[in-house]
Amino acid sequence: MKISQQLEAKLNAQINAELYSGYLYLSMATWAEANGLGGTANWLRKQAAEEQTHAMKIFDFVFRRAGRVTLTAIEAPRTEWKDLEELFAQVYEHEQKVTGMIYDLVRVARAEEDFATVEMLLWFVNEQVEEEEDSLAIYEKVKVAKNHTCLLVKLDSQLGER
């Protein structure tokens, strides 16, 4: 069954959002590298690659449903953060925003009774639980460590193990 025009448009917007997420995380990685946080930069680079994979999962799905992918410009991401706490606060907030977008897609797919799209999106629902959990855990650790250089160095090292 061909995907509806409404879902096709929304999935195209989600592809753009996933690519933007990757672009944002790469920008964050450049900030981390410039600030001597190589482990954090590694974690963010891996996160960026994961977002690219998410975009391609939706990209392929649209084609499997006889739809058309329309790529649009990716918004330029922010390039500066006050500190690591502000950066990971944005990571967590961004993942919450993406979760909301996924939930909106599920609502539309359910309303259209497009069960194949609902099924595909449920993978993203579960993925977003993990994304929010991980980003919140790191954000909470950064808040605790922010005034303790030794803890920040250790956290940066742990993030580099991803």
Image: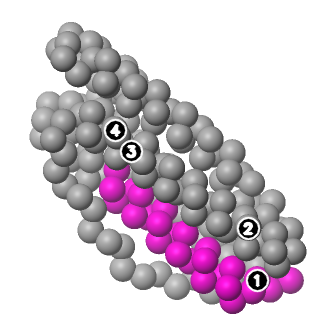
What separation in Å lies between label 1 and label 4 (alpha carbons)? 36 Å
Q: Is residue 4 magenta?
A: yes
Q: Is residue 76 left or right of residue 120?
A: left
- Can residue 157 be seen in this snapshot? no
Residue 87 coordinates in the image, percent (x, y): 28, 41
- Front tag of 2 and 3: 2
Quadrant, the N terminus: bottom right
Q: How packed is label 2: few (under 14 Cα within 10 Å), some, or many (20 or more)?
A: few
| Amino acid type, residue under disc 4 in the picture | Phe
- Front tag of 1 and 4: 4
What separation in Å lies between label 2 and label 1 (alpha carbons)? 15 Å
Residue 82, compared with residue 117, is above or below; it is: above
Which stretch did the figure color magenta? Answer: 1-25
- Front tag of 2 and 1: 2
Could you tell which of marks 1 and 4 lies nearer the N-terminus? 1
Circles 1 and 4: CB distance less than 8 Å? no
Disc 1 target residue: 3
- Is 47 in front, or is 141? 141
Q: Which mark is residue 88?
A: 4
Q: Secondary structure at mark 1?
A: loop
Quadrant, the C terminus: top left
| Amino acid type, residue under disc 2 in the picture | Arg
Q: How packed is label 1: few (under 14 Cα within 10 Å), some, or many (20 or more)?
A: many
Disc 3 target residue: 91
Could you tell which of marks 3 and 1 lies nearer the N-terminus? 1
The structure residue drawn at horizontal position 42% and vertical position 82%, both measured from the top left corner, is 72
Q: Which mark is residue 107?
A: 2
Q: Is residue 73 left or right of residue 70?
A: left
Circles 2 and 4: CB distance less than 8 Å? no
Could you tell which of marks 2 and 3 lies nearer the N-terminus? 3
